[in-house]
Image: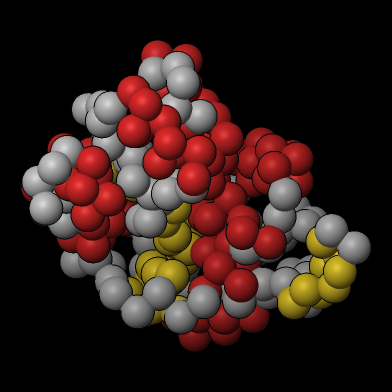
Amino acid sequence: MREVQNAVRVAGRTIMKATFELEANELQLGGGPIAGVDEVGRGPWAGPVVTAAVVLDPNNIPDGIADSKALDHDAREILYPRILASALDVAIGIADVDRIDRDNILNATLWAMAEAVNGLKKQPRLALIDGNKAPRLKCAVRTVIKGDAKCLSIAAASIIAKVTRDRMMIEAAHTLPGYGFERHKGYGTAEHQAAIHRLGVTDFHRRSFKPIQLALGLV
């Protein structure tokens, strides 16, 4: 099993990079598979929550994996196919706007995480979940606060989820022009707020979120 460097240069600065130490210890203690799980899109006013589960190959981990938030668009787009090609298993879970509005954002996110893990070809022995909330799974679960900055499997999942969601939002921009989804990805920017005032609320917006309720005159 090769060593993974614990620092990386990003945008001219050095940041701490996720390592494979946690997974390596767990593999030695209890075996695998071990999946890293992360989500993208809890905060936006529009669009789905996207989650990913990734089982990395300990002997074939692409260089440069880090928390997706610390990487720019080009770096994520380079790493995305490399992770798909090298990982032992990858699966996606998507909670759409209807589920978010019906179940609330936290429950929708946990549901999507479970969908991602359940979508793996082989059930993992352990799922490493970013954050402090875990979905109900058939396998063992361990939450890791700031796991996407600490754990390579979770960081890889964050990249897969981020690229997947960004592409969905770019596609939404083609069907819903004028909102700028290709730029802000549904987050609550001034551009997005101005577009809602100008064009109105769409079915792609989360009506359970207060800014959208305000725009609709519901609160």
Q: Residue at x 20, y 48 (%)?
A: 214
> Against 161, is 152 above or below?
below
Nearer to us in this view, 116 or 17: 17
- Identify the residue at horizontal 58%, vertical 50% (top origin): 159
Residues 159 and 199: in front is: 199
Quarter holding residue 215 = top left
Q: Position of residue 161 (x, y in %)?
A: 48, 47
Using residue 77 as the reference point, say whether residue 137 is left or right of it.
left
State the colouring used for the structure image.
secondary structure
Look at the image and tell me in which quarter the N terminus lies.
bottom right
Horizontal and vertical percent position of residue 172:
42, 23
Extreme-right residue of the structure: 12
| 85 in relation to 118, above or below | above
The picture places residue 33, in percent across and down from the top left corner, at: 46, 63
Query: Which of 62/150 is in front?
Result: 150
Q: Position of residue 76 (x, y in %)?
A: 68, 45
Give the total of numbered labels. Answer: 0
Say which of 39 and 80 sits in front: 39
